Amino acid sequence: MKTKIKNFLRELDTEVDVLNYIDIDNIDFENAFDSIKDMIEDNNGFDFEVIYYSNAIDYLSENDPSLRESLSLAHEMGYTADNLSSEILASLLKTENVKNEFDELESEINDFFAELEEEEEEEEE
């Protein structure tokens, strides 16, 4: 069963290397998505750093050309204008985007674990 779970998590369409941030033995099958997401968050797996000015500017121009979203995120996190840079804004935005993309996997993850639990129950009968 662990191999099946590892293969599933490895193949998820996400930038997060899920297996590096979770403990398979601690996944709550009843609430698999939240359980996995919490482990990733607790281990800073959603934190992405965009380094180098040119990379940051490219990321921002592609994903937030008006800077509204990234500046809003920075404000929510307590940043002030004097301690902001394009790299910080791009990193905050990329982190938020990766989290949002991961959220889109909720039904896929929950369905997989529900099916896995059903298979396990059938094997026990």
Image (cartoon, helix red, strand yellow):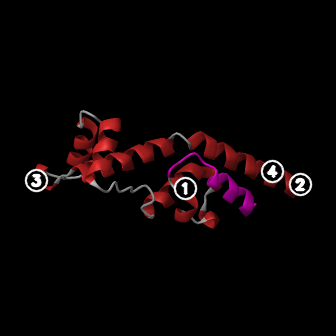
Residue at (64% x, 66% y) in the render: 25
Q: Which quadrant of the rendered structure holds the N terminus?
A: bottom right
Which badge, 3 or 2, is on the more N-terminal residue?
Answer: 3
Q: Amino acid at mark 1?
A: Ile
* Foreground label between 1 and 2: 1
Which badge, 1 or 4, is on the more N-terminal residue?
Answer: 1
The picture places residue 48, in percent across and down from the top left corner, at 39, 55
Q: Quarter of the image holding residue 5?
A: bottom right
Q: Which residues are magenta?
A: 1-15
Q: Amino acid at mark 4?
A: Glu
- In the rendering, which numbered label is found on residue 125? 2
- In the rendering, which numbered label is found on residue 36? 1
Residue at (22% x, 42% y) in the render: 71
Q: Position of 73 compared to 124: left or right?
A: left
Instruction: Classify 10 Å Cα crowding around label 1: few (below 14), some (14-19), many (20 and above).
Output: many
Q: Position of 108 compared to 69: left or right?
A: right
- Which of the two residues, 110 or 22, is positioned nearer the viewer here? 22
Which badge, 3 or 4, is on the more N-terminal residue?
Answer: 3
The picture places residue 24, in percent across and down from the top left corner, at 63, 63
- In the rendering, which numbered label is found on residue 69? none
CA gap, disc 2 and disc 4:
10 Å
Q: Amino acid at mark 2?
A: Glu
Which residue is disc 4 drawn over?
Answer: 119
* Foreground label between 2 and 4: 4
Which residue is disc 3 drawn over?
Answer: 82
